[in-house]
Amino acid sequence: MHISVSSTALLASLAHILTASAQDACPGALTPSYAQPVFADGWTGSLVAKGLTRPRGMQLDSQGNLLVVQQGVGIVHLQFTDGGGTCLTLAKKTTLITDSVLNHGIGLSEDGKTLYASSVDAAFSWPYDAEAVTLGTKSTIVTGMNNAGHSTRTILLSKKEPGWLILSRGSAGNIDPLAEDKSSGHSHLKAFNIANLTASSPPYDFTADGRILGWGMRNAVGVGEEPTTGGIFTVENSADNVARSGTDIHATNPGEEMNFVGTLASTENQGGNYGYPNCLAVWNTDIPNIGSMTVGSQFAVDVTDQTTTVTDADCEERVKPRLTFEPHTAPLDVKFAADGSKAFVSFHGSWNSPIPVGYRVAMIDFANGQPVAAADSQTAAVDLFTNSDITKCPSACFRPAGLFLDGTGRLFVSSDATGEIWILGPTSSTTPTPPATSGGRRRARLPRL
């Protein structure tokens, strides 16, 4: 999008006014080094922490303090002074763990007394005292996940079925031949029963042990549990540089995916093959030999190093995504409103797209445990928190990574590229609840609270 000099000056002036207004309303408010982001109508937000090192996964402890994984550094403990709404100011920063292998995943037990985090190869636990901000001895819970390529191992502790830990392991590269083999453990989502583990229990082996929730997921970084039904959803980063019938289609295909893998209370809709590496999801239907396929259909891609030949008919047998998102937007997290009415998704942003795409947080309407939108919708994700000029990305904009919803419905957002934490919330309440709006990919209208 071309912006004239006068338009650029207007945006800069508006950003200055918004920044000054925020500082008046919230003394000590921080200012980003890039243009002030845009919030959906009825929402606002504040930059509450700067100077972190690649912040990724986040978790609030029982004292209301934020634990943040700094990729390649460890875990930091942030204590805020809460002025109500989105007015939070950092009061104290404490290094909780120094460990360079920790890179993304984090979680807490339901009682808040056990902390979990992950490396490329393992998931760990520590006894945690939130009041004293101290840790006990580290234990290894799951191991055997090391591979090249995608290195994050997302952790989810189930609230619906306490005692279960879910781990996501991605592929060893863009197209990973090993992911064809179910026994390899590559591109798997698995659950482990940790209810009766002790400090002396041997760790699970990811490949040999655990319950397969789904496989054939290239890199399902975001994993969330819908609170009313216990449904487990993932958001998946799909492949780059894809061709079909000799035609380069990577600019507009394949789509990123939201997948449903059932619940931990049942094996229904569970354990299926979600397509990767041979089958990917259609986003733009202007591709060779489209036939009757539509958005979200699984199609066969050109591959040169796979062990089997897969056709579109074979791909029809794979599990289709529940929703499909614009290619290269790189969804990294998904969190649900407490009443199940919304899913919030962070789109980290592109590196393999002709134009910048993503770099935003969006919300998706849910009802009865499922997205309201049809599976072939291209407008299910509604903009909530966006960069004012996406052409500046990725060098001069925020890149959302981790998300965390607090007990009042405020949403913490980490930006790994800029080393920041933002907090978002509705404008009309100091103790906001999640919105219940609907619509396509556009700026949302005023939510009903």
Image: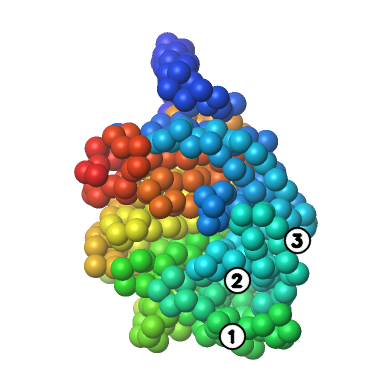
Could you tell me if the residues under marks 1 and 3 are in contact, i.e. CB atoms within 8 Å?
Answer: no
Along the viewing direction, whichever of 279 and 22 lies nearer the viewer: 22
The residue beneath circle 3 is: 101
- Image coords of residue 149 (percent x, y): 68, 64
Q: Of tags 1 and 3, which is closer to the observer?
A: 1
Q: Is residue 303 above or below residue 328?
A: below
Whether label 2 touches label 3, CB < 8 Å: no
Name the residue: 61% across, 36% down: 91
Mark 3 neighbour density, 10 Å: few (under 14) some (14–19) many (20 or more): some
| Residue 294 can be seen, yes or no | no
Residue 17 at x, y = what percent?
43, 15
Q: Vertically, is 340 above or below 122?
A: above
Query: Which quadrant: the C terminus?
Result: top left
**Mark 2: few/some/many CA within 10 Å (<14, 14-19, 20+):** many
Residue 325 image offset from top left, x and y in percent? 40, 55
Which residue sits at x=39%, y=36%? Answer: 85
- For marks 1 and 3 on the same chain, the one whose residue lies earlier in the sequence: 3
Amino acid type assigned to the residue bearing label 1 in the image? Asn
**Residue 184 position (above or below residue 240):** below
**Residue position marked by numbered label 1 in the rendering:** 196
Count of numbered tags: 3
Local secondary structure at mark 2:
strand
Q: CA distance from mark 2 to mark 3?
A: 16 Å
For disc 2, the marked residue is: 169
Whole-number angstrom distance, CA of label 2 to CA of label 1: 23 Å
**Location of residue 169 (image quadrant):** bottom right
Which residue corresponds to the image point at 57% horizontal and 72% vertical from the top-left?
167
